[in-house]
């Protein structure tokens, strides 16, 4: 099946509701990092603002931010913490054009689709059949390899198994990964697998616990901290397999965001949460497909920074977001936190990666 992006249908701005709508109101920031009262907060959906008689869509957005009107009547989405004194912040809490702001949630929907008001099995659970989801994902990834920006958000479970670790390496080597977001544990246990063939002391193939295996990840961290970067560590230790080394070899960026419970951490792990957010945001700004694998908090963080659309060559296209986990609770949490465009798949993460790799490359 050849994948094609759904066509975006913009609002009809010739309608009276838009023609009669007022211009957006703005107010200057008077204290750094503090938005004025009645500021407008962004959503995941395309939003239009009436400025100088023209309805303008946000070219880059993210949930729960504010909109700043710049010189030349351009619009910038900013986190509140980054507001500067004098920034002209858009005001208004309605999104129906009444305050010069219009939220367009159904631009990518097929209006011909309909369903019964009452029906069974509309949620996503362990009972859901995911065959069609997998087929659509394979087609999507083949398209995105050449035309998009694929961001993988990964927990350490992805590297606890030899086959899933190899599957991810193969996907990176073949261009299906444009950025990896994760934490200290992902990189630590991937490097542990490269050096000791274990993860948290268990053999990554047999799952047998090795004597003194609980020292392995600490040994990896300690060795790595002798170097300025993971790239230096990989070169010095001649590490040639794993997600970290493959990303380094292929020039795929990794953002490792630290947490309170981290051991070490490894070099390159960003300990400041807002610096981590900024580093992740570099990639969510460009993301056209996001896959969150077995990491609830990192997936929610990434999903909440990723809009439901991107503007590419002046046209709006959808952003595809997947949440994959063995826990129904975990995959549905991202939707509960506002990322309404997510597709949830309940499955073992090792099986997921092996299936994706085999269907794309075998």
Image (cartoon, rainbow, N blue to C red):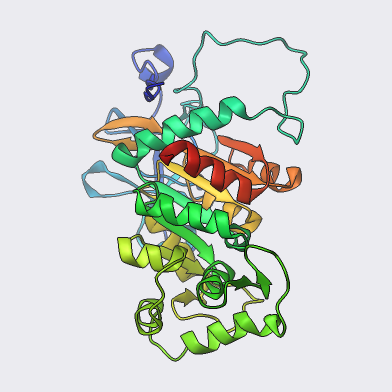
* Name of the residue lying farthest toward the left: 72
- Residue 247 visible in this rendered orientation of the protein: yes
Which of the two residues, 105 or 91, is positioned nearer the viewer here? 105
Percent position of residue 338, x then y? 61, 42
Q: Going by the picture, which residue comes out furthest to the bottom?
A: 226
Q: Position of residue 304 (x, y in %)?
A: 54, 49
- Against 19, residue 218 (above or below) is below
Q: Quadrant of residue 208?
A: bottom right
> Eyeballing the image, is 103 above or below 184?
above
- In the foreground, 223 or 292: 223
Q: Residue at x 74, y 47 (%)?
A: 327
Relative image position of residue 144 (x, y in whole percent): 36, 38
Residue drawn 48% across the image and 75% down it: 269
Quadrant where the N terminus sits is top left
x, y (%) of residue 111? 51, 11
Residue appearing at x 30%, y 37% in the figure: 147
Q: Quadrant of residue 179?
A: bottom left
Looking at the image, how many numbered discs can be counted on the residues?
0
258 displayed left or right of 10: right
Quadrant showing the C terminus? top left
Q: Is residue 327 left or right of residue 9?
A: right
Q: Please, is residue 89 above or below residue 341 in the view?
A: below
User: Closer to the camera, 106 or 99?
Assistant: 106
Residue at point 49% right, 15% down? 110
Whether residue 35 can be seen here: no
Q: Residue 245, located in which quarter of the rendered image?
A: bottom left
């Amino acid at each position: 099946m050849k994948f094609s992006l759904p066509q975006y249908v913009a609002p009809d701005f010739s309608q009276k509701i838009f023609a009669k709508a007022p211009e957006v109101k703005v107010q200057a920031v008077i204290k750094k990092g503090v938005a004025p009262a009645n500021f407008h907060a962004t959503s995941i959906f395309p939003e239009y603002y009436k400025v100088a008689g023209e309805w303008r869509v946000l070219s880059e957005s993210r949930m729960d931010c504010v909109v700043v009107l710049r010189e030349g009547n351009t619009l910038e989405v900013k986190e509140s913490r980054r507001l500067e004194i004098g920034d002209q912040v858009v005001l208004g809490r309605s999104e129906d054009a009444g305050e010069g702001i219009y939220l367009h949630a159904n631009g990518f929907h097929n209006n011909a689709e309909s369903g019964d008001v009452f029906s069974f099995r509309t949620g996503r659970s362990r009972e859901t059949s995911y065959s069609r989801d997998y087929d659509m994902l394979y087609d999507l990834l083949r398209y995105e390899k050449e035309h998009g920006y694929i961001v993988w958000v990964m927990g350490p479970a992805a590297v606890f198994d030899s086959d899933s670790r190899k599957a991810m390496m193969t996907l990176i080597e073949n261009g299906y990964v444009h950025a990896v977001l994760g934490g200290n544990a992902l990189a630590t246990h991937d490097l542990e697998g490269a050096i000791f063939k274990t993860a948290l002391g268990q053999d990554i193939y047999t799952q047998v616990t090795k004597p003194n295996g609980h020292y392995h990840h600490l040994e990896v961290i300690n060795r790595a901290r002798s170097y300025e970067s993971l790239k230096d560590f990989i070169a010095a230790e001649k590490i040639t397999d794993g997600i970290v080394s493959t990303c380094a070899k292929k020039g795929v960026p990794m953002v490792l965001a630290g947490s309170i419970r981290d051991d070490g951490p490894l070099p390159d792990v960003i300990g400041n949460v807002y610096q981590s957010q900024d580093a992740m945001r570099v990639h969510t700004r460009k993301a056209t497909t996001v896959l969150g694998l077995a990491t609830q908090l990192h997936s929610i963080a990434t999903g909440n920074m990723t809009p439901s659309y991107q503007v590419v060559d002046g046209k709006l296209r959808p952003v595809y977001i997947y949440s994959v986990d063995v826990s129904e609770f975990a995959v549905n949490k991202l939707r509960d936190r506002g990322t309404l465009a997510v597709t949830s798949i309940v499955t073992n993460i090792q099986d997921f990666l092996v299936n994706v790799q085999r269907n794309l490359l075998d």
